[in-house]
Image (tube, grey):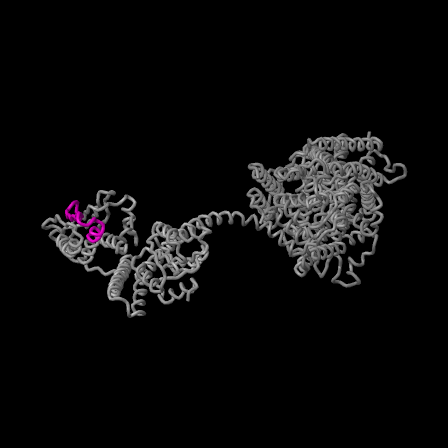
Amino acid sequence: MLSGWFVALLATGYLGLLFAVARFGDARADAGKSIISANVYALSLAVYCTSWTFYGSVGRATSGGLSFLTIYLGPTLMLLCVGVIIKMIRISKAQRITSIADFIASRYGKSQLLAGMVTVIAVIGVVPYIALQLKAMAASVDVLLEHAGNGVEVWGLDSTFLMAVVLAFFSILFGTRHLDATERHEGMVAAVAFESVVKLVAFMAVGLFVTYGMFGGLGDLFQRASASADLGRLLELDSGRAGTWSALIILSGLAIIFLPRQFQIIVVENVDESHLKRAVWLFPLYLLLINIFVLPLALGGLLHFDGQSVNPDTFVLTLPLVHGAEALALLAFIGGLSAATGMVIVETIALSTMVCNDLVMPILLRSTGNFIEKRSDLSGLLLGIRRAAIALILLLGYVYFRAAGEAYALVAIGLISFAAVAQFAPAMFGGMYWKQGTRAGAVAGLLAGFVVWLYTLLLPSFAKSGWISSGFVEQGLFGIGWLKAQALFGLAGLDEISHSLWWSMLANIGAYVAVSLNSRPDAVEASQAERFVDVFRFDSRNTEARLWRGKASPDALVGLLERFLGAARAGQQLAAYAAARKAGNWRNLPADAEFVQFAEAELAGAIGSASARVMVASVAQEEDLGLEEVLDILDEATQVRAHSRELEAKQRELEAATAELREANERLRELDRMKDDFISTVTHELRTPLTSIRALSEMLHEDPRIELADRKRFLGIIVNEAERLTRLINQILDLARMESGRAEWTTGEVDLGEVARESMASVEQLFRDKGVALDSDIPASGLVVLADRDRLMQVMINLLSNAVKFVAGGTGQVHVKLGVAAGLIRVEVRDNGPGLTPEECGVIFEKFRQGGNTMTDKPQGTGLGLPISRQIVEYFGGNLWVESAPGAGANFIFTVPLPVPEDNNGRQTK
Amino acid sequence: MSKKILIVDDEPNIVISLEFLMKKEGFAVAVANDGEEALAKVASFEPDLILLDVMMPKKSGFEVCEILRADPSKAGLLIVMLTAKGRDTEVAKGLAIGADAYITKPFSTKDLAARVKTMLGTV
Amino acid sequence: MKRANPTRQRLAALGLLGVPLLTYPLLSLPGGEWAGIPATYLYLFGVWAGLIALAAWVAERRGP
């Protein structure tokens, strides 16, 4: 049954099944009904478990005990730092990043140099790992066929070589059917997830078989092992290897993201960030499950094959076989095949993308520009380059297998690759979290780390297989003891992996930091640094567009797209873009910054961001934004949002304050106007009598021969006007003093009745001259108030003189009445003059305003008497007003509050 | 034929002084006490020059001036504005309206007489 | 500054916790055996499973 043909058929059949799954996945993706769910995504991460896991772990466990577990603990812990992974994904989506080389190159200013370097390191670093898969496959085929007694040579060719060819074929089929700007291969992911399930099932089946079928369970197995001294050692951990333990955890933790296939699966193939939630625990769970039976299998194998030289890496196959469980063995074989093919397919696809976009294309563009320009459709060329790369990488893997594979156990080979991709860590983590990291620093770090890795791990691996002399390992380079490849500078006692990790990281990180701190980023680097480190804060759309200035013709850009994506795909993407911008046809859209960004992003998917940058720059006449400008724009974008909320709050405050200010201003202006009016009026009032005085005085002075009659008249006028002027000035000063509170008041007990009588007496002559009757009605007592006597006299006289002024001569009557009511003394001065309109009742109390509208007999008053009287009355707590109607005379009334009576103790009662 | 002067002011004492002054200079004088009376007297008396106070009831001096200036038949009438308000804005306003001169009170009688004589061309 | 996502921070804390639990010197503590199975083996797988369970609970409990 286990003939070579049967095995080959089975293998091919399984690969065909995988391919069908992949096609199904792609078809669903094209139809828009992606089958990539959170579970599928999480399972696809298990591509991490290759033949190394399937075969190699058991082998490792036979010599190192539980140390094999470190390779899976590292990824568990790294997955828990899911924030880092999400940031990586977010950045990659924003920047259209399609590989590790692209990521690093893009971050450090879209540098083609870095892109190439990373690609070279990745290829060289991963070749051993691919060789590992080939070795495992070879071994497993050997086991199956030798058991059946058949040879392994088919058509005169080494079976391993055939396997490499087959794997190349399937990889090309899976990954290079067309160019996708996003470099996503949903079919491949689906196939990988499927494979992961097969691996787990197969391995656990064998584990269960051996543990419970061949032995009496875990307890039985372990007890039997501990009975033997050799095996017992495996059950404990060797604390002397503590350093190795931690080093391996670190290495595997880095490898889970930096292996090209891992980056591809975790970051590039990710369709939804929320899938990470599932992956965080489901993937470690997978790792746990697949590792439960590794140690039992190792112990079982050792116990069973004690004394025989069976390759422990193959226990997974040999144990079922010796028990005649051929079907199980075939299942295990398929499991191992799954593990190997999954790894190879994804890894070579990822690597070929890098080789094409980041290594070959830049060289082609730079050296043979004409060649590129002549070709109108480059999409075929790109696919061709990728296919060639896949084949070449597998060939290299085969060569390494032959050159160095014999000397090492599987796991040791794998760890060499881990140490290589770990060199990407400083540049990548620095790129994501440290804006000061520069291109020069990244180049220096990568170079230093790679050289140290080369010297301490890769070259010694060749030496151990005998392909090169091992002088530099045993005696040091050029015989210098300090440069012993695996005991650099005297650091002995570490296993080679830890040793290499320590020195390469020291060199890498040291060079990266030191050079970065001493170099300045250029404009593109700085803007990329912002975009990477601040990706969660960034509003990418606006600033992207603003960071580009130049002129481009849409036709030139579209031409680029067609050449690199192929006309059909370019047309598709253009239509989608136009639809997104709500234009019917892309021709209606301007070749603005957004269009250029779109074109560049699409190109980046096909040829890498560094090359895309170069191509777009060549067709657009771009203006270089200086570093300052770029930083300004970016700073602006981030600051603007931060400040806008502050601004809103401040604006509201400001508006409130402004409204208040405006009101206050209005009030002030009003007062100012009133003040101006007052001053202007006062000026006028003062100047008027002065005019007569001056004029008449001058005339008298000029001409002494004026007639006596005129002289007398003039002098009389002068005297009157002088008096008028004096009165006016006094009253103005009085009023001013009262209003500003600086008037002098002599308050004492005043009998209002007596005041009334006296003031009447003083105006008696005036009344008699005009023939106006004056009478009064004054109570005998009870009219005592606390006030200024003179001032109250002033008020009374003012009212009386007003009255006599306005009543008609001869028939005029003025009546004075005093009374007490509700704690007030009430004084009324009534006349039977022409009366006042309601409007005038208010107007006459205004400064300089006088009653009477006929103006035939211009009164000699100043217009200030009533305002002053009112001030006086109000000062003592009373009121002054007039009640009048036209033709019904006027009644001026004022009140003065009576003093509050005191009780016997001298306190005032209310 | 002596020139005719119309004196317009609501202050009687000022009117007295101006009247005396102008008569002494040999002009024929008429008097008005407010704006409306002034316009009536302008029509009936037909003065050559009018001494016009600004602050008056019924119609202010500015209004009278505007009305007179709007009348083309009175284009030759000289208008001298008198006022106790001396602010620049008032002066500018008066001249803008079309007064020929603007004099602030209190004034010098000598100056006023000289001015009037110059304006009327009789020295 | 990243948006302080509580779920991510909790998970990172779990990861940080895992480091001392799964490395020396703590690793050298368990000794002996239990039901025939070495304590170290049980300890490693037990802590591992525990971390996974906690991670599952934190990650799936609430949406970010």
Q: Does residue A131 appear left or right of residue A638 in this picture?
A: right
Q: Does residue A124 appear left or right of residue A758 in this picture?
A: right
Q: Position of residue A74 (x, y in %)?
A: 65, 46
| Residue at 31% across, 69% down | A703
Quadrant of res A564: top right
Write down the region rendered in magenta: A799-827
Q: Position of residue A671 (x, y in %)?
A: 37, 54
Q: Position of residue A444 (x, y in %)?
A: 72, 57
| Residue at 51% across, 49% down | A646
In-front residue for pair A475/B34: B34
Is residue A409 visible from the viewing direction of this image? no
Quadrant of res A297: top right
Residue farthest along the right direction in this orientation: A156
Quadrant of res A681: bottom left
Q: Does residue A722 appear left or right of residue A451 in this picture?
A: left
Residue farthest along the front direction in this orientation: B1
The quarter of the rendered structure image containing the N terminus of chain A is top right
In-front residue for pair A509/A790: A790
Is residue A634 visible from the viewing direction of this image? yes
Q: Does residue A889 appear left or right of residue A539 in this picture?
A: left
> Quick check: is A830 in the magenta stretch?
no
In-front residue for pair A784/C1: A784
Give the number of callouts: 0
> Quick check: is A821 in the magenta stretch?
yes
Residue farthest along the left direction in this orientation: A780
Q: Position of residue A173 (x, y in %)?
A: 80, 36
In-front residue for pair B77/A22: B77
